[in-house]
Amino acid sequence: MSELHEKQNLNEEELSDIVELVDDTGRVLKFYHIATMDYKNEGYAFFQPAEEIEGAEEDEVIIFRLAEDDKGDEVLLPVEDEALLDEVYEEFVKMMEEEDDCDGDCDCCHHEDCEGKED
């Protein structure tokens, strides 16, 4: 019984990382939110499909720029500049590699679990 309960908690935790985004046609798509980071004074959010989505691979990373609309609400905007998209993706890869290499006692981390996280 406790094994089932642990699996159930894992699934709830996994589901808490799923966000629903609405595309231009009004279709609701489910994604895993895998990271958010700043790059050159702009915020970027990184997602992977949580379900089969036409035109997107299962392990594809989809990047949006964080912005505010005229009401002050946060919105996700596509990154249309291919060169900028490549730069942001490369920075994301570096950040993920740093987190993978981290032993929990460094000054470089961007993730919350690191004891050496800078304030």
Image (tube, rainbow, N blue to C red):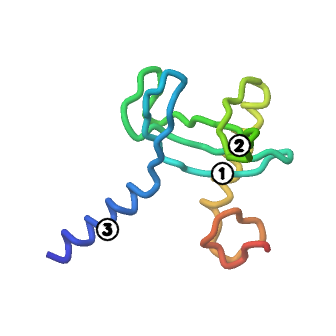
Label 3: how many residues lie within 10 Å, few (<14), some (14-19) or many (20+)?
Answer: few
- What's under tag 2, amino acid-wise? Leu
Q: Residue visible at 52% across and 28% down?
A: 23
- What's under tag 1, amino acid-wise? Thr
Q: Is residue 11 above or below residue 114?
A: above
Position in image of residue 5 (x %, y %): 22, 72
Q: Please state which of residues 67 and 87 is positioned toward the viewer in this rendering.
A: 67
Which residue is denoted by mark 2 in the rendering?
66
How far apart are labels 1 and 2 at the CA level? 9 Å
Q: Please state which of residues 67 and 58 is positioned toward the viewer in this rendering.
A: 67
How far apart are labels 2 and 3 at the CA level? 30 Å
Give the secondary structure at mark 3: helix
- What's under tag 3, amino acid-wise? Asn
Residue farthest toward the right in the current orientation of the protein: 40
Give the secondary structure at mark 2: strand
Which residue is denoted by mark 1 in the rendering?
36
